Image (tube, rainbow, N blue to C red):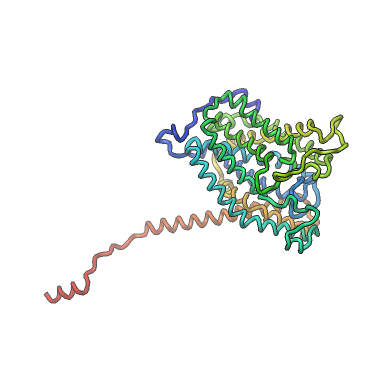
């Protein structure tokens, strides 16, 4: 999503190195200390994802289509935080993922990088789907039984009444890994075409095209951001919307491979980004309150309900469900996500030159925090609702967020300590002096020597 502030001084495009024309002296991606700010941003964004999910039971209006373990006392401040994070958080991850995917391909080749990414994403996706999602399912069932939404017999038979389980089945928060894998395959296949794009084509066509694709997807399916689409397979509208931000990161690499321009000018985008985010949250929450029953407009999976809404409520002279209203909300949402994403990237690059030990540890743990926090947060919400009924929602969000972050961070810390022990033991065994084994004569040879 090219912003006007940066488009005024577009950096000169640099030639891309591919597997075919890469110099023999270049064997791997350059050292990434230059991108310490991006690592810091990724760590903070991982914590923000946990906070987002910690806010779910207290958000009103809540996210249509998102099945959660419990619902608790609504809170306006928590609602504002929830929707502000929801608008910007995934675009941050997607733009960063697209940028570094392009960077890796430029130095290591398209299909080599794609195969490496598929292994790194595929195995965690497979393992967490097999082992983590069943735990999450029964955590959700515990909350539903405790709230009286379902009976224990329904859980045993896995048969539910009233369509309560309509949005229960899918990859949950793991959809992000699945989508990234499809984007990597598509990027590898189109890389040879991409390297022929000029700076003018990217600035005038490609980046605005990404913005337009995201707006169209969100206009047709508002639940991409303002609801939740749950499925075991990619949902077309969500795939297009997320892919637009991933592609924006790829194209940005073509314009600014070292992110120097973004580090210098990115902070200028923060003010407009905050204003647009505030406007999007205000209008979006109003729209959700006006639109009424989410079953009338939200679609999930491949065979979702038609999002056409019939309502007699108006905004001025326009029906709240009109295409104009939905497109206006989409433009606000995509604009806010774009500006905040590039602003935070630029500010992080300009202000962080070296990670502190705590931030480095958090950055290293960010992937495990993302993978493991979901059932922990769901279980903590159940405990908080029934064990701390009088505690404020803000305090509950802080407590649940801390537990969610600690789950992944502690596992990462233990894994790091184990690797260090193994490395130290290996070094100690290599440094230990080895005794020299001298040849020993057999007893027969000794007897012959004595006889002689």
Which corner quadrant holds the N terminus?
A: top right
Could you tell me if residue 134 is visible in this image?
yes
Q: Nearer the viewer, residue 201 or 235?
A: 235
Which corner quadrant holds the C terminus?
A: bottom left
Q: Is residue 416 left or right of residue 228?
A: left
- Determine the image quadrant of residue 268: top right
Q: Nearer the viewer, residue 213 or 342?
A: 213
Could you tell me if residue 2 is visible in this image?
no
Of all residues, the one furthest to the right in this rendering is 312
Kindly identify the residue that appears in the image at 37 percent across and 59 percent down: 432
Kindly identify the residue that appears in the image at 47 percent across and 32 percent down: 17
Kindly identify the residue that appears in the image at 84 percent across and 39 percent down: 290
- Determine the image quadrant of residue 426: bottom left
| 340 is higher (above) or lower (below) than 414 | above
Of all residues, the one furthest to the front in this rendering is 303
Q: Position of residue 364 (x, y in %)?
A: 56, 48
- Determine the image quadrant of residue 266: top right
Kindly identify the residue that appears in the image at 53 percent across and 34 percent down: 191
Q: Position of residue 440 (x, y in %)?
A: 23, 68
Q: Is residue 359 left or right of residue 160?
A: left
Q: Position of residue 407 (x, y in %)?
A: 63, 55
| 291 is higher (above) or lower (below) than 450 | above
Q: Position of residue 355 (x, y in %)?
A: 55, 43
Q: Nearer the viewer, residue 41 or 379?
A: 379
């Amino acid at each position: 999503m090219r912003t006007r502030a940066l488009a005024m001084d577009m950096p000169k495009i640099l030639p891309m190195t591919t597997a075919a024309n890469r110099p023999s002296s270049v064997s791997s991606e350059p050292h990434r200390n230059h991108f310490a700010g991006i690592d810091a941003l990724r760590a903070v964004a991982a914590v923000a994802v946990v906070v987002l999910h910690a806010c779910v039971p207290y958000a009103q209006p809540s996210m249509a289509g998102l099945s959660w373990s419990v619902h608790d006392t609504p809170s306006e401040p928590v609602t504002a935080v929830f929707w502000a994070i929801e608008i910007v958080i995934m675009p941050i991850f997607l733009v960063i993922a697209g940028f570094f995917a392009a960077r890796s391909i430029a130095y290591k080749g398209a299909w080599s990088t794609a195969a490496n990414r598929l292994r790194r994403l595929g195995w965690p996706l497979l393992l967490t789907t097999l082992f983590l999602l069943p735990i999450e399912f029964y955590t959700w069932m515990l909350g539903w039984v405790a709230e009286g939404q379902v009976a224990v017999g329904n859980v045993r038979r896995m048969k539910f009444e009233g369509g309560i389980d309509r949005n229960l089945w899918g990859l949950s928060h793991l959809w992000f890994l699945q989508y990234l894998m499809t984007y990597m395959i598509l990027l590898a296949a189109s890389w040879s075409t991409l390297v022929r794009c000029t700076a003018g084509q990217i600035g005038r066509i490609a980046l605005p095209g990404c913005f337009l694709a995201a707006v169209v997807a969100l206009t047709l399916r508002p639940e991409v951001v303002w609801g939740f689409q749950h499925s075991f397979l990619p949902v077309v509208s969500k795939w297009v919307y997320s892919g637009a931000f991933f592609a924006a990161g790829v194209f940005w690499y073509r314009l600014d491979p070292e992110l120097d321009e973004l580090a210098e000018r990115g902070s200028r985008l923060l003010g407009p980004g905050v204003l647009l985010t505030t406007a999007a949250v205000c209008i979006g929450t109003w729209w959700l309150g006006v639109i009424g029953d989410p079953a009338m407009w939200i679609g999930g999976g491949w065979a979702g309900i038609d999002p056409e809404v019939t309502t007699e409520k108006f905004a001025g002279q326009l029906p709240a469900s009109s295409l104009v209203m939905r497109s206006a909300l989409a433009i606000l949402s995509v604009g806010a996500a774009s500006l905040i994403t590039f602003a935070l990237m630029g500010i992080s690059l300009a202000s962080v030159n070296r990670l502190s030990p705590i931030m480095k540890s958090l950055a290293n743990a960010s992937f495990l925090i993302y993978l493991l926090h979901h059932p922990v947060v769901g279980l903590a919400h159940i405990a908080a609702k029934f064990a701390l009924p009088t505690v404020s929602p803000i305090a509950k969000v802080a407590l649940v967020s801390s537990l969610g972050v600690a789950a992944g961070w502690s596992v990462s810390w233990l894994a790091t300590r184990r690797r260090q022990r193994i490395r130290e033991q290996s070094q100690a065994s290599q440094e230990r002096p080895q005794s020299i084994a001298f040849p020993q004569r057999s007893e027969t040879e000794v007897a012959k020597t004595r006889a002689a």
